Amino acid sequence: MTTAAKLLFTGKTHVTSGPDGAAHANDGSLDIKLTQPHPAAENLFAVAWSACYLGALGLAAVQRKVKLPNEPSVDTTIDLSNANGAFFLRARLDVSVPGVDRAVAHELVEAAHGICPYSKAVHGNIEVTTTLA
């Protein structure tokens, strides 16, 4: 981060493990039990990425002066796999942009990956498949 960067938000959590494991956001927006590391980690990653991605999709629409007549949605699947003793992730995002011309929706879906920090963070690091529903 450069000195010219404007900090927009900081998420801070406290996570404990074990049979009484839990995750708590310091701002109170998250309070869940995590009795096992998996599938909690994959589900939390899917939720966080999806929320960010939908925000990026909305911003892509605003930048292109596209009115979204209905709320878009995304179903995100995160797979945790193991090959030769190494763990890795794969992701599938099934995106719905109802009421928008399919070609325009496809452009928004692609543009959102260029805006979303989660998409940028995983780009080239994990296999990502995005489909327009």
Image: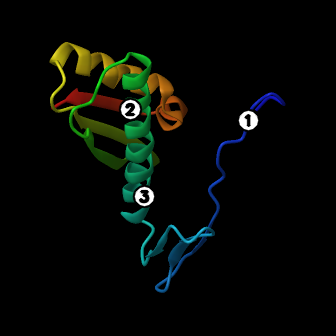
> In the drawing, does residue 11 fall left or right of residue 35?
right
Q: CA distance from mark 1 to mark 2?
A: 21 Å
The answer to which image quadrant residue 32 occupies is bottom left
Q: Residue at x 50, y 38 (%)?
A: 118
Which residue is labeled 2 in the image?
A: 58
Indicate the position of residue 52 as horizontal and vertical percent values. 45, 42
Indicate the position of residue 63 as horizontal and vertical percent values. 44, 19
Q: Residue at x 21, y 37 (%)?
A: 70
Q: Amino acid under label 2?
A: Gly
Q: Amino acid under label 1?
A: Lys
Instruction: Reply above or below: 64 against 92.
Output: above
Q: Residue at x 37, y 39 (%)?
A: 54
The mark closer to the camera, 3 or 1, is 1
State yes or no: discs 1 and 2 in contact (Cβ < 8 Å): no
Indicate the position of residue 132 as horizontal and vertical percent values. 20, 28
The answer to which image quadrant residue 133 occupies is top left
